[in-house]
Image (spheres, coloured by chain):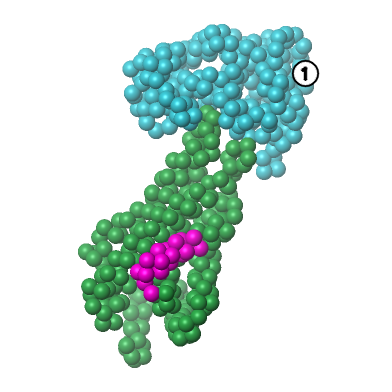
Amino acid sequence: MQQSNDVTGKVAIELNHVSYSDEGLDIIKDVSGILPEGKITTFVGPSGAGKTTIFRLLNGLISPINGDIYLFGENTQSIEPTELRRTVGIALQDATMLRGSVYKNLAMPKTLQNQEFQKEEAEHLLTQVGLDASFLNRDVADLSGGQRQKVSIARTLVNQPRVLLLDEITSSLDRISTSDIEHLIQHINQEFAVTIAWITHNLEQALHIGDYTWVMMNGELIESGNTDLLENPADPRVQQFVKGDWQ
Amino acid sequence: MSFLSLGLSLIFVLIPLILSKTLNLGLGKDTFIATIRSIIQLIAVGYVLTFVFESGSYLFIILMVALMIGAATHNAQKKGASIKGIVWKLIFTFIFIEILTQSILLGFQITPPTAQYIIPISGMVVGNSMVLSILFLNRFTAEIQTQKKETELLLSLGGTPKQAIHLPLIHSIKASLIPTIESQKTIGLVQLPGMMSGQIIAGADPIQAVQFQLLILFLLLTTAAVTSIMLGFLSYPTLFNERMQMLKIKKDEEE
């Protein structure tokens, strides 16, 4: 694995020889790498490379078979699962919604902690993600793909995560919605110093939004470093992938 | 009823056999086997019950109830094969429901403590509990699959397994209770319950028969509610590990 050393600053997440398999199939193979704190790290690679599995490992929905994951220096296996998941929030490609109103969805992280979520807080959050307060009482079934994604991100932000994992959140959106979401994520990253990890199939997007990049293939981390590595990759497989020749 | 009359009642078996043959339904073999099995099983139970009633021994009563629980567990566990330790969970549920109902019946002297009452009532309680378990397990394993995304979403937002599985669990409990509640709404209007009909045919006072039937109906309502809720709360923790991660469940062999 190629890893550039030009990253300075603190590390939010570190993976140390992490492997994961399911039903005898090796999905993540001895992956070691970092997510720099306060930066946007983009994850690129062909389908089936294991990017989503890495996110599920980071959020604690699954555990590594081998190796360790450290969150701000602490082994995630020693962090209480609910606390880990609130600290490392995840928003998925399909933006799964719970039946009911936008408010019900936004309030869910607080409801799970038996806490109240004020309407004013919800309205403020909606404004933050680019939706106006009138959305609060709307049924989630009536939302467009982009609106659902925004609600999904806002819902994850209710827990005030220190790390935010975004799994192909713009892949099914039009250009304008994609641009809105990109600005939103950059705003969240800069305004709240949230560390972002973003899976994308769009190399252009990875280049203009990312500070740091992981290139994954067949469950391995092939190359990682500052995002400009995509312009001049060292690994021949990554060169092929960037050129669009990778099968 | 004489043996001749009973023999003549086989006409009611011949009708479906003829229909199956004529319309090529292919149900002849199953109908025949079911008839033979019911004749052998019921006659055997008749002799066993006569022996138990005459002996007056509580040991035989306990053995009879244990046999019922064993058979009910064997039948219901197929639907919950994907849930770890389902056999013990079912046994525990059936024993609990049996002790609960008999404690109320015998403790308040609603029924006398004799085999004649304990065994048939236990049969109805365990039988009903078994049907409820099958309905619940069938629905619960399906709900877990269909609501997997929502369950994982709640976990990912920092919910506990109990919070994450709450909706599928409640839906399954409700769905399994609906047939019991709905059938009680129309009872006496659409159909006369089997036990009550049996008592009336045997010459009992209809009011007396109704009183017993009401007792059984109320008993079955408790049985239904306790069975589903208990089995639900015993089952859901096995779907998660100690890191609050959802475990994969295998598809039922029966499906």
Q: Name the residue: 59% across, 23% down.
A: A88
**Chain on which label 1 sits:** A
Q: Quadrant of residue A209?
A: top right
Q: Quadrant of residue B118?
A: bottom left
Circle 1: residue type: Gln
* Residue picked out by circle 1: A2
- Residue B33, given in percent of the width and then of the height, sits at 47, 77
- Residue A75, given in percent of the width and then of the height, sits at 70, 27
**Secondary structure of residue under mark 1:** strand
Q: Name the residue: 67% across, 40% down.
A: A22
Left/right of residue A224 with respect to residue A183 in the rendered view: right
Can I make out residue B84 in this image? yes
Q: Name the residue: 52% across, 22% down.
A: A159
Which quadrant, please, contains the N terminus of chain B? bottom left
In this view, the residue in front, B160 or A105, is: B160
Looking at the colours in the rendered structure, which chain would you say is drawn in green?
B
Answer whether residue B1 is magenta in the image. no
Q: Is residue A39 above or below residue A245?
A: above
Q: Quadrant of residue B211?
A: bottom left
Looking at the colours in the rendered structure, which chain would you say is drawn in cyan?
A
- Residue A110, given in percent of the width and then of the height, sits at 47, 26
The range drawn in magenta is B94-112
Main SS type for the magenta part? Answer: helix
In this view, the residue in front, A196 or A143, is: A196
Q: Is residue A97 above or below residue B188?
A: above
The crowding category of the residue bearing disc 1, from other C-alpha atoms within 10 Å (few below 14, some 14 to 19, many at least 20), is few
- Residue B42, given in percent of the width and then of the height, sits at 44, 80
